[in-house]
Image (spheres, rainbow, N blue to C red):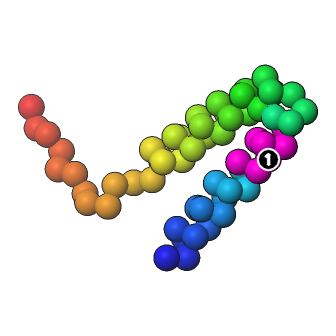
Amino acid sequence: MRTRLLYVLEVVFALAILFGVALIHVPAALILGGLAGVVAVERALSVPSPAPRKEARS
């Protein structure tokens, strides 16, 4: 539960920063949003799967 709350807090914080940047310069906010999306996907893919996989033998 605590980690889920921290993830929500992280997302809200990132959105607040992007909104603040967008008030000044929209293209910069779009670029930062894209970079944040790439980082989020890389973080999600770096977490190992909970169940071990069996290696396929050929």
Q: Residue furthest front?
A: 23
Residue ID at (68%, 35%): 33
Residue behind mark 1? 17
Q: Give the range drawn in magenta.
A: 15-21
Q: Is residue 30 left or right of residue 55?
A: right
- Count of all numbered marks drawn on residues in the image: 1
For numbered disc 1, what is the local secondary structure? Answer: helix
Q: Residue 18 at x, y = what percent? A: 76, 41
Q: Quadrant of residue 2?
A: bottom right
Vertical side of 7 occupied by 54: above or below? above
Residue ID at (45%, 53%): 47
Residue ID at (65%, 30%): 34
Residue 43 lies in the magenta-colored region: no
Residue ID at (22%, 51%): 53
Q: In which quarter of the image is residue 37?
A: top right
Q: Which of 55 and 17 is in front in this view?
A: 17
Give the class, few, some or many, for how many residues have Cα within 10 Å of label 1's Cα (few <14, many ≥20).
some
Q: Which amino acid does label 1 sit on?
A: Ile
Q: Residue 16 at x, y = what percent? A: 76, 50
Secondary structure character of the magenta stretch overall: helix
Q: Which residue lies furthest to the bottom in this view?
A: 1
Quadrant of the frame with the C terminus: top left
Q: In which quarter of the image is residue 5?
A: bottom right
Vertical side of 12 occupied by 56: above or below? above
Q: Which residue lies furthest to the right in this view?
A: 24
Q: Which residue lies furthest to the left in this view?
A: 58
Q: Is residue 10 left or right of residue 29?
A: left
Q: Residue 14 at x, y = what percent? A: 71, 50
